[in-house]
Image: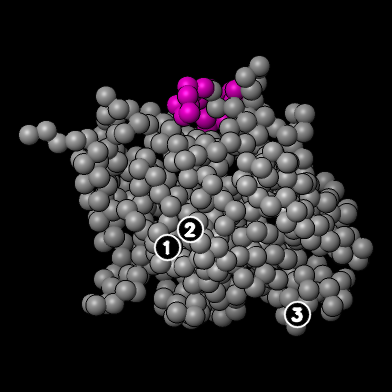
Amino acid sequence: MKISISLVFAALVSLSQGQGQTQGQTQAQPGGSTPATCTNMRVRRNAATLSTQEWQNIGNVVARMAQDGWVGRFGASHDRLFSRVHGNTCFFPFHRRYILEYENIGRTYDPNFVVPYWDATQSARNPMADPLLSANALGTNGQGGDNCLADGIQGNSQLTYPNQHCLRRVYDNNGSIRQWYAPEIISSYIQSDTSLARFREDIEYSLHGAVHLGMGGDMNSGYAAQDFSFMVHHANLDRLWWDWQNTHNSYLMYDGNGSNGPASLSDMIPEDSSVPFNGATVESVMVLGYGNVCYTYDSSPSPPQSYPAAGGSAPVNNATPQQQQQNQQPNTQQQPNQQQPNQQQPNQQQPNQQQPNQQQRQPPNSNSNRRPVLSGSSNMANRILENSGIQGALGSSAVSRFFPGLNGWRAPNRRRSYQEKKVSGCGEPIPFPPRLTPEWVKMHGYDADRVEMFHKHACEIVEVLNNSTYKSPY
């Protein structure tokens, strides 16, 4: 009796997902629909803190995933779903689930693998100076007539989707990169946006597009996910969403339009057969630390102590993982993936069935009982803005409008776990953010007038800050 490859593939994916639902979690209450609590958590770190060896380890995983066809499958999946997961509120839950799937597959090759996040606002004034854009990390600009990436963890890579070609990179400003969105702008979005629909537009029309366009090449395409820059960039956008959820205690807010009409938590996350999600719903990824979403970020609040009620609120544990623990080394007893790609259909190989080994969650820090109100772009931005006298510089009216979280709040001093680099230009006027290109707007099906309105709002934030006594430390 012949059994089709597609049926075997679907069965293996189902088995893999079923295994993932039990490992690292407690049991849900009988008869209830509340997601189980993760008992083991992994921590996504700021990519700027990674050592050269850690980048090499990531590169080894990405290379093996590419060899087995996974990188091409992720590129194909994102391209095919492009119009359904951009320009609507599904943007956030889709990419959260998408990056998680990539990370889980990567951990079958190396149990230490975790996708770091790229806080591009740290180099907003001069993206070319970003430590990630170096030969030891993501690589530099493309070379030659085809703009092929020749260095970095994916240097000289050959991609398979939509056809065989080198990984291309074309900086957007004649060999350099236009300035990105400053941390003050993103912090304002997190504090002032009271609906997810509004926050999604603010992020999607700003930092999201600016980094994609700045990198150019394959990052300026529907199949951008083949460039690992995509993964670290979207991990950062996911972190910003998590910071927004915590800032407003709105873990289950999902409003506006989804991919198929009015947004609903019961909506299925759009999926493609090349990277299936097994019918996962939006609600299944809304709260970090529950269900299969067993990770958090080194600079963000830890997951709530209990699953949020229908209204979205929950008891809050505001200690960051850095405050609770140092990043623990996962158990390395798991064996690396031994599966071989399907010889007849290289892009349809069976998914890895081994499950990731995760980091154990520590008890909440009882000394942290306040949610950070400036979570815009990592602890560095939080501390900078909180201690910079922004309240006195802007006055109560502007603070209430653009930075409402600062009203009547005095921040504690914080310390980072790594050395902050001095940036030339600190104290100078904040640069106005770049516009999205007409081609980018058209590719995503955005409303051009609405995009322009959001850009003007970002410029207004910059103008208000520059016309005050506020001095940006970037």
Residue 449 percent coordinates (x, y): 75, 53
* Residue 158 included in the magenta stretch of the image: yes
Q: Nearer the viewer, mark 1 or mark 3?
A: 1
Residue 318, quarter of the rendered image: bottom right
User: What residue would you read off at disc 1?
Assistant: 267
Question: In the drawing, does residue 150 fall left or right of residue 103?
Answer: right
Residue 69, quarter of the rendered image: top left
* Front-most of residues 296 and 163: 163
Question: In the drawing, does residue 162 fall left or right of residue 290?
Answer: right
Residue occupying image coordinates x 78% and y 77%:
400
| Label 1 with label 3: CB-CB less than 8 Å | no
Q: Which mark is residue 289?
A: none
Question: In the drawing, does residue 107 fall left or right of residue 439?
Answer: left
Cα distance between the residues tagged 2 and 3: 39 Å
Residue occupying image coordinates x 73% and y 76%:
404
User: What residue would you read off at disc 3?
Assistant: 407
In the image, the segment drawn in magenta is: 148-165
For the N terminus, the image quarter is top left
* Residue 366 included in the magenta stretch of the image: no
Q: Which mark is residue 260?
A: 2
| Label 2 with label 1: CB-CB less than 8 Å | yes
Q: Can residue 320 be seen in the rendering of this structure?
A: no
Q: Nearer the viewer, mark 2 or mark 1?
A: 2
Mark 2 and mark 1 lie on one chain; the one further toward the N terminus is 2
Mark 1 and mark 3 lie on one chain; the one further toward the N terminus is 1
